Image (tube, rainbow, N blue to C red):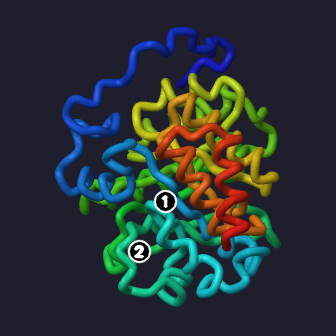
Amino acid sequence: MADLDDIRDGDNFGLNTPASTSGFYLKGMDGSDWGLKNRMARIFNPESGRTVMLAFDHGFLMGPTSGLERIDLGIRSLVDYADCLMGTRGMIRSCIPAGCTKPVCLRTDTGTTILTEMNHNTLISEEEAISMNASAMAAMLAIGDAATEASTIANFSNLVDIGNTYSIPVMGVTAVGKDMARDARYFGLASRVCAENGASIVKTYYTEGFEKVVAACPVPVVIAGGKKLPELEALELCYKAIQCGASGVDMGRNVFQSDAPTAMIQAVSAVVHKDMKPQEAFDLFETLKNEG
C-alpha cells in the first residue's frame, strides 16, 4: 500500500529528451498492434502528430445546453473541420450522417446527470462500440473523488480490456476531484493513472507546469477546452498546451458556443496543426467570421 506521508514530487521529467517514437509516430504506441495504431492514425494527423477533436458529448450530463440545442444544425456544420468527433451513441446515430468518414471517439460511460450526484457511471456494451465503428472509446476517471474514484477506475480498466481485445484505443477523461487543487501535481497524477491503467489517449486540463504533466504521461495528451472563454483566450490556451507538448485538443464549448463556430474551429486547427500564434489565429478567426 502506498505510504501517504512519503509521496515525493517528481523532479526529473527529462524535459529536453523527447519520448522515442521509432516504431510509430505517436508516443507510447510501439508495443501496440496494427489495428490500434491504424485507428490512432485516423485520429491524429500523421504530419503534425496532433488532433482537433470536436467534443459534443455534454448533453448526456447537461441536456440541450447552449450550442447543442440542435446537433443536426450546429455540429454538422463543423464536422469537416474536425479531425475526430467525440459524442454519444444517441447523438451520433441520430444527427451525424452515416456517410461521414470522420473517426469517432465514442463516449462509452453513462449514468448520472448534473441534477444528481455525479460520476456514478456504468459502461455501455462492447457490441455497441463495435457496431458504431468507433475509432476510440472514452470514459471518465474521477481521480480524487472518494465516493467514485474506485468505481470509475474499475469501469475504465474494464473498457481497456475491451479495447485491447478489439484493438480500439481508449481515452481516459480526467474528472476534477471536488477537493483537489487544479494544478500540475493533480493533473499529472490523474493523467498518469489513466496511462497506468492502459489509456492510449489522455484528456485533461491545461495548467501552469503542464510540460511536466505531458512528460510524465507516456501516451498522447489532449486538453479539454473547459468553460467558454473569449476566443483569443481560448486560442492562447491551445497554443500554450501545444508548446508544452500536448498532442491536440478535445474542445466543445469554446467552439460551438462561439459566435462564429466554423471560424473558431478553423482557427483552433491552425494553432494545433500549424503552430500558428494566438494573435495570428485570432486574426484568422475574425477574417473567416466576417467572410461567413
One can see residue 57 in this view: yes
Q: Nearer the viewer, residue 190 or 289?
A: 289
Judge left or right: residue 146 versus residue 188: right
Q: Is residue 165 left or right of residue 142?
A: left
Taking the spot 67% from the left edge, 70% from the top edge, the residue there is: 291
Q: Which residue is mark 2?
A: 125
Q: Earlier in the sequence, mark 1 or mark 2?
A: 2
Label tally: 2
| Marks 1, 2: nearer the viewer | 1
Front residue of this view, candidates 79 and 9: 79
User: Would you say residue 202 is visible in this rendering?
Assistant: no
- Return the residue nearer the eye: 234 or 6: 234
Residue displayed at 49% across by 59% down: 138
Could you give the CA–CA distance between mark 1 and mark 2, rounded to whole angstroms?
A: 13 Å
Placement of 150 over or under 95, stated as above or below:
above
Q: State the quadrant of the C terminus.
A: bottom right
| Amino acid type of the residue tagged 2 in the rendering | Ser
Report which quarter residue 8 is drawn in.
Answer: top right
The structure residue drawn at horizontal position 80% and vertical position 52%, both measured from the top left corner, is 229
Judging by the rendered image, the residue that carries numbered circle 1 is: 138
Q: In terms of secondary structure, where does tag 2 sit? A: loop
Cβ atoms at labels 1 and 2 below 8 Å apart: no
